[in-house]
Every structure is written in structure tokens, then in C-alpha cells.
Image: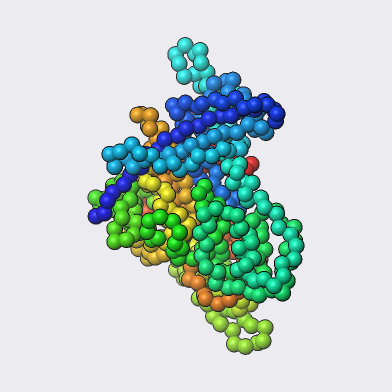
Amino acid sequence: MGVQRAFKGDVNLVFNYRANKGSSPISYQIPSERISYVMVEHLYENKNILPVVYVNINLTSDIYDKVMNGTENSKFHLKLRKRDGLSGTSVFKTMVDDEFSYVTSTSNPNYAVNLDSQGLDAYKGIMVGLVSSSMTNTLRTSFNGIYRNTNTAALVDVALAGMKGVIKAPIVNSEKYAQFMVPPISSRFKMLEHIFENYPFYNSEFTFYMDFDRTYLIPRNGAPVSGTNGPDTIIVDVKDYTSEEAYVDGFTVENGSYVVYVNATDTKMIIDNSVSKITNNIIGYNDDYSDPQNFAVDNENVTDNTQKTTYVRMDHAGMLKQMLESNTVMLELLKQNLDGDIFTPNKSFNVSNYGEYSKFNGRYYLAYKREFFAIDTGGEFTITTNVGLKKAGTEVPKPLMRTFKSTKKTTSTSSSATTTTTNNGGSSSARSTVTSVTNSKTNTRAQLA
């Protein structure tokens, strides 16, 4: 077995209060013991396209009021660090060090918890959602005009110009243009969508995501794209709870790959059986009335389900097949004391399950990641990583053109149907805690969108 690693965290939070736009900031250090938890959320399939940090804190009444009233002019500065808890050293790696705009979310703003027996010092609990100010400004870039004598690949470079640490999968489909019209567009993501709708540069949907230290543009096909440190492949090995490896902390490096052993009680499989009831076969036709092609969709998980065929243009069929397959199977997992930095969207995830779930083994791509910092009795933060992986559909290597909008509509109809969630086995207190946190901050993300 390779070298084992497990990680602990450190949180430094400062509230920089401005009474009005022209005033100088007054800094308030938030003691770590007043921080209940911090969660860094990355939704790689979401159009917010940058991380959101949720912080639950207990504040004295005067600072609480300043936070509630200061959203227009005030900021939070957050520094997150982590260290290898098994290395025997105290060397920390900085994960986040940035200034954030914020919104507040609290179920009852008048609720106070007395933290001392005399009741002399009342603290109020509040959750704030943080979004990096500098990253938001970078994303809000405007585009408009006519680009002449260009091509798809060059237009993608225009959309990414000035982004830091770009990790981009090679463009596989590129069209030449004598002129390319761009209407007024207010963000880089909308620019990429506009290019993709005219001529899809990948044979699957794409992920565009700006992380704290790098930017990704990759297809959702599960293939590795080099650009980050360490191996490009992660093996997720789900073990029965009776297995010794099910209780291995962190991750290991074995034969040139990251290996993450996961206790089956800390996973669940989400199988969307409804997708195949709508479409499990595609026939692509051509405008010239040549022979159509048949594409069988690998999403059949229901017995005695009859064939449901969808007829689409040939240049539409390959992407629709890949998208329907990718929205059928998801693996969710929790892992404590794990460096979540290894889970990046450019990695290839090979899932190995056991028992009846082994039929879902194969290549997956990263749909979301949440890193949850909770303070322990020693004043240090333990880290729990919550990851969602989607099984990658089979790509059809054929150029696709100008039909992506209708493709997205079809997929939305399929994914809105009922899904079936199956636990691999048991439940865990860590899962219920993270689920509770995720549910409690839903309205915060809606305000940030």
C-alpha cells in the first residue's frame, strides 16, 4: 500500500466593517471557537461557475448587527489552511486567502444563545455565504461585436483571455468563420455558451469553472486533462464495512494513481430509472434522406421496459446519447480527513464498487465537491469531503452543429423525472451533518445566483 495521508484544517476569519461606502474599514477578528463550521462548495455543473463558501458563526450582538447591516459596503476576509495530520509536521498549505462579498441567512434573526451561566454575554448564530470579489470581477467580462477571419478555437481563447491557471482540454471540433457575430454578452460563461451553440467544440457538454487558483474548460466525458499536480487518475474503491481498507483515512498513491478507499456506509448510489422510460434509443436522420443511424442509449436499469425511441437530426444524436447516459447514475460519498484538492474536474475517476453495484463500475466525472471544516475539541478543524461523481456516457466522435439548445431542453425534461436513491449500506453521522448543512444554505445560494 502507498503512503497514507490525512488532513486537518485551520480557519482565520476577519470581518472588515464599513458603516458607509466612504468610511475606513474596522476589522473584527472572529475567534475560531465561535466558528461552528465552514463549507466550501463547488458545483461544477452549476452556472454560478465559482466556489461559494458558507460560514456558520456565533457573534456578539454588536458585531451581529454590523454584519446584518453591512452587506453593501463590508467584506469578510477568509484564510483556510490545511496540513497533513499524519506527517508529524505542522506545515500548513494555504487553500483560500481572499476577500469576499457576502449575503446573510438565518432562520430567526432574534434568536440568541447564552453561552455563559450568568447570561452576561449573548451570542447569535448566523450563516453567511461568501463569494470572492476579485473572482466575480474577473468573470464579469463583456463581449460584443464582429470577429472576422476566425475559428471556434480562436473564439474560445478570446473568452478565456486573462484567466489564471487555465486547464483546457484540446478543442476537438472547430469551424472557420469569415465573420462571427457576438451580441452584447456580460460574462465569459455566456460567451462560451454562445460559441458552443453555434458549433460545439466538444462532443459532450462542457464544464467551465473558476477555482481559487485555476480555471477549467473541459468536456464532461471523464477523460483526464493534465494540468494539476499529482496523478491524473483517481481510483475510488468502495469497500464493504467489514473490510479493513474501508477504514483507511485520507488517500494513498499506488501505481501512479490516487486511491481513495471508501466505506460503503458512507456512500449512496442515485439511479435515475425514469430517463430510460422516456428515451432509451435514438435514431439520427439526415436532411438528404440517407440511411438513418441507430444509437442505443446505455441507461437501461429497469426490467421489462419497452423501447422508447427519439428521432433527432444526425448532428444532434451523438451528444444527446452521451448526455442521457451521463444523467443516469451518480455516486455520492463522504470521506473524513481527506485533502479535497485531489478531487478536481480535470481528473479521471475510475469507480470500483462491490456486490450488486459492481455493474456500475467504470469511468465517472466530478459533478460537485464540498469540503466541510468542523472544529474539534482540540481547537483544530477536521475536514470531511463530500463528492458527487456521475457515470460518464459514451461519446460518439462525430462533429456536432448548431442544435445544442434543443438538446439541453430534451435533457431537462428527462432529468426532471423521479429518481431512485439507494444506500450502499447503512448511514453515518457525518452524512447527516453534511446533509443538514447543505439543506440549510439553499436559500443563500439562491441569493448569490
Residue at (38, 32) in percent of width and height: 380
Specify whether 186 is left or right of 347: right
Q: Can residue 370 be spotted in the picture?
A: yes
In the rendered image, the quadrant that contains the N terminus is: bottom left
Which residue is at the front of the view, 236 or 97? 97
Residue at (60, 68) in percent of width and height: 153
Q: Can residue 332 be spotted in the picture?
A: no
Q: Quadrant of residue 226?
A: bottom left
Which residue is at the front of the view, 246 or 129? 129
Specify whether 47 is left or right of 230: right
Q: Position of residue 6 (x, y in %)?
A: 33, 44
Q: Is residue 63 above or below residue 260?
A: above
Q: Is residue 378 above or below residue 61?
A: below
Q: How is the image coloured?
A: rainbow
Q: Is residue 349 above or below residue 33?
A: below
Residue at (43, 53) in percent of width and height: 343
Q: Position of residue 419 (x, y in %)?
A: 51, 57
Which residue is the extreme one toward the bottom? 290
Q: Position of residue 95 (x, y in %)?
A: 45, 43
Residue at (40, 55) in percent of width and height: 229
The mark total stands at 0
Which residue is at the front of the view, 55 or 184? 184
Which residue is at the front of the view, 321 or 306? 321
Q: Position of residue 400 (x, y in %)?
A: 60, 74
